[in-house]
Amino acid sequence: MLRVGMLTSGGDCQALNATMRGVAKTLYQSKEKVEIYGFLEGYRGLMYGNFRRMKPQDFSGILTIGGTILGTSRTPFKMINEPDENGLNKVEAMKKTYRDLNLDALVVLGGNGSLKTANLLANEGLNVIGLPKTIDNDVWGTDVTFGFQSAIDVATNAIDMIHTTAASHGRVFVVEVMGHKVGWLTLYAGMASGADIILIPEIPYDINKVIGALKERTKAGKGFSIVAVAEGAISKEVADLPKKEKKAELAARAAKYPSVAYEVSAAILEHGGQEVRVTVPGHMQRGGAPCAYDRVLSSRLGAAAGELILKRDFGHLVCMVNGETTPVPLSEIAGKLKVIEPDCSMIREAKAMGICFGD
Ligand code: F6P
């Protein structure tokens, strides 16, 4: 008998169900008798023994369905060693549930924070397999995370729609794209939708360069402009501040503007003659059905996770490296952020086409 626990943790994304289906189908294909336990609402389910005994039919018909059939929650890693409001030791509670259910393995579908907890549990002796989930694409070790391509499609579609109305009215539109501390989603969606200016955290922007690029476009007879700004984008003047002052400045800006897109738009408005509008697609970018690319990616990653479990080969994050599913030790990836290198070929090519990054 092989008993496998499964949970989805952190912000949801489009291909969580597709990935779990990949794992489950692979396990059920084996000659072994398999029992799968689904923990509800992420690590909380593991902590409080809140789970469902899954059946093969639970994994049928979910390939194309967004969200997660198990529910999810955020369990900040920095609080993991602090007792809960009732004094419960969270790590010990998770180990206890795992042992009480006599599990042979725990599959964690999660992003950076969740994978740090997965690594901690592996170090505590649990047999853990991680799967790289997030629209942000910032998980170290894998070329791509599931959810990323689907979110690119949503953000691209949003900017495409903005394009037509921006052109009709001759306006500047600042579209804010998710991505947490990194610019992957903004870079890809910006390029896919023909954004004129792309602002990402990895390349702090000089607002004068942004305004200069907008003026150049007007001079060249372009009646409108699209600025794709990552939610984590930061101006050069703030990025260059010492840590403490930077924190204070960011807090002051957060009190003044709802988000960075509003800050950028206010600066553009102050300097330029054009009307400016802000659009924030927000959580839409995590919603809806996974795109075809993600369905394949998730199925492959899920199947590879299933194969590792059947081989009793644990302690890995199942990554996609150069088109091949590849197990990478959780200890190697935990706590690392995959950022865009400002001098990478994609940025160089975007700049070669005239896209402004505000630097
Ligand atoms: O990590 C995915 C993500 O959507 C980020 O892009 C964003 O910063 C964050 O989650 C939003 O979190 P929440 O859903 O808790 O508002």
Image: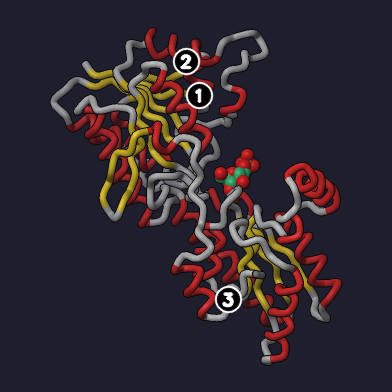
Residues packed near mark 3 inside 10 Å, few (<14), some (14 to 19) or many (20 plus): many
Q: Identity of the amino acid at label 2?
A: Met
Whether residue 65 appears in this view of the structure is: no
Residue at 50% x, 49% y is: 135
Query: From the Cβ of disc 1, is ligand 1 less than 8 Å away?
Result: no
Among the 4 quarters of the image, the one containing residue 6? top left
Query: Of callouts 2 and 1, which one flags the residue occurring earlier in the amino acid sequence?
Result: 1
Q: Which mark is residue 43?
A: 1
Tell me: 134 left or right of 168. left
Q: Identity of the amino acid at label 1?
A: Tyr
Indicate whether 187 appears above or below 36.
below
Q: Which mark is residue 355?
A: 3
Give yes or no for contact between labels 2 and 1 (Cβ–Cβ under 8 Å): yes
Q: Nearer the viewer, residue 147 or 356?
A: 356
Percent position (x, y) of residue 51?
A: 44, 19
Indicate whether 52 appears above or below 247.
above
Give the structural element (helix, strand or loop) at label 1: helix
* Pointer 2 residue: 94
Q: Identity of the amino acid at label 3?
A: Ile
Percent position (x, y) of residue 22?
A: 30, 39
Indicate whether 185 appears above or below 271.
above
Work out which residue is located at the far front of the displayed protein and give it.
Answer: 242
Q: CA distance from mark 2 to mark 3?
A: 48 Å
The quadrant of the rendered image in which ligand 1 is seen is: top right
Q: Nearer the viewer, residue 280 or 348?
A: 348
Work out which residue is located at the far left of the displayed protein and give it.
Answer: 31
Percent position (x, y) of residue 347?
A: 51, 68
